[in-house]
Image (cartoon, rainbow, N blue to C red):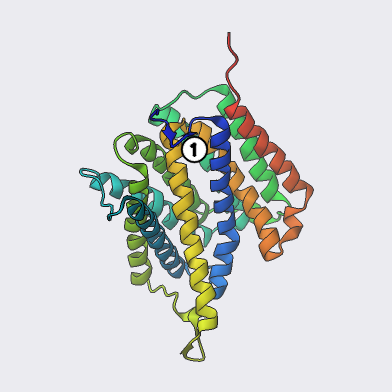
Amino acid sequence: MGEKKAGKIDLTNLYVVLVLAGLCCFLWGSATPAIKTGYQLFQIDSKDTMSILLFAGVRFLLAGFLVILFNSVQTGSWIWPEKGSGWSVIKLSLAQTVGQYYFFYVGLAHASGVHGAIITGMNVFIAILMASLVFHYETLTKKKVIGCILGFAGIVVMNLQGAGGDDMFRFSFMGEGFVFMAQLFYAISSALIKKYSKKYNVVIMSGYQFMAGGVILILIGVMGGGSIAGGLVRDGAFTMSIAVPAVALLLYMAMISAVAYTLWGVLLKYNPVSRVSVFGFMNPVFGVLLSALILGESAQALSIYALAALVLVSLGIYVVNKPERQA
């Protein structure tokens, strides 16, 4: 059995990458309505950055615990970080969980939703550029650039519908600048996963980096005065009818991270960064479509803009993954 196979599944096969990466993007897309619902259940204001970071920290701590617990049950004993992997786990955690989400949530609190979505759509392009020009994992080709431009154009088309006014031209370092910083951390984490997965088990690393990052985010949120318990209390009493769906939703969000990031890490281990990362353009598309189904936000999802965005994103994915023509 080859190293690039898990069981009988060839993780380098394009159709396998398509299915698994598509599943990851679907799960991440479902996080958009889940997070909005979570804010309502826990009564977290969208501008309360510290409570949001605390909420995210609890989510990622649970996600890491679920990853390690599941694999420990499979092996019959608790899995600990591999010898010598401690600093790698910490560095990956600081990039993938702490840096990315701290800058993302703080930035969103000071940036418009349209700007945030468009800048976030740049993360695929940045990840491919960093993998090619900084870490030299692969060659930056014309088709990768064209594919990224197509995908990014789809994100712009989807998010510019109905946008206008002076706010479209307002930028701030604490807002759009922080959202952009989050995309840099995303790109760095993708490259680090590729690097560390050659030496360590990517699933174990994923679990422990989530746990470490979750603890750090929780500490930042608590020290900043954040709280998520208030939403579970009504008239001074703990309410089970609110707590049960709130905790269930939190567990689902933890599962999203546990499954999606672990699969994504495995795919990055066995494939070029560009082949996997380009599917990230599907995240906002799934986010809009699932928000339409779950939250009733159908106006944006059922528009001509969404259809055009889906076509552009699909073309971008196809161009990047199109086999090279043989001489």
Q: Residues within 10 Å of mark 1 (few under 14, many from 20)?
A: many
Q: Could one spot residue 119 in this view of the protein? A: no
Image location (x, y in percent) of residue 321 = 58, 28
Image location (x, y in percent) of residue 177 = 48, 50
**Residue placed most toward the observer, 321 or 67:** 67
Q: Could one spot residue 279 in this view of the protein? A: yes
Image location (x, y in percent) of residue 85 = 25, 44
Looking at the image, is 45 positioned above or below residue 33? below
**Residue placed most toward the observer, 166 or 94:** 94
User: Which residue is pictured at 70% across the width and 59% down the height?
Assistant: 292
**Residue placed most toward the observer, 33 or 200:** 200
Question: In the rendered view, does 69 fall on the left or right side of 256?
Answer: left
Looking at the image, is 37 positioned above or below residue 318? below
Asked which secondary structure carries label 1, the reply is helix
Image location (x, y in percent) of residue 298 = 74, 59
User: Which residue is pictured at 33% across the width and 61% down the height?
Assistant: 216
Reading the image, the residue beneath label 1 is: 126
Question: In the rendered view, does 206 fall on the left or right side of 9?
Answer: left
Q: How many numbered marks are there?
A: 1
Name the residue furthest right: 304
Name the residue furthest top: 327
Question: In the rendered view, does 316 fall on the left or right side of 237?
Answer: right
Q: Choose top left, top right, bottom left or bottom right for residue 241.
A: bottom right
User: Which residue is pictured at 27% across the width and 54% down the height?
Assistant: 77
In the rendered image, the quadrant that contains the C terminus is top right
Amino acid type, label 1: Ile
User: Which residue is pictured at 39% across the width and 58% down the height?
Assistant: 66
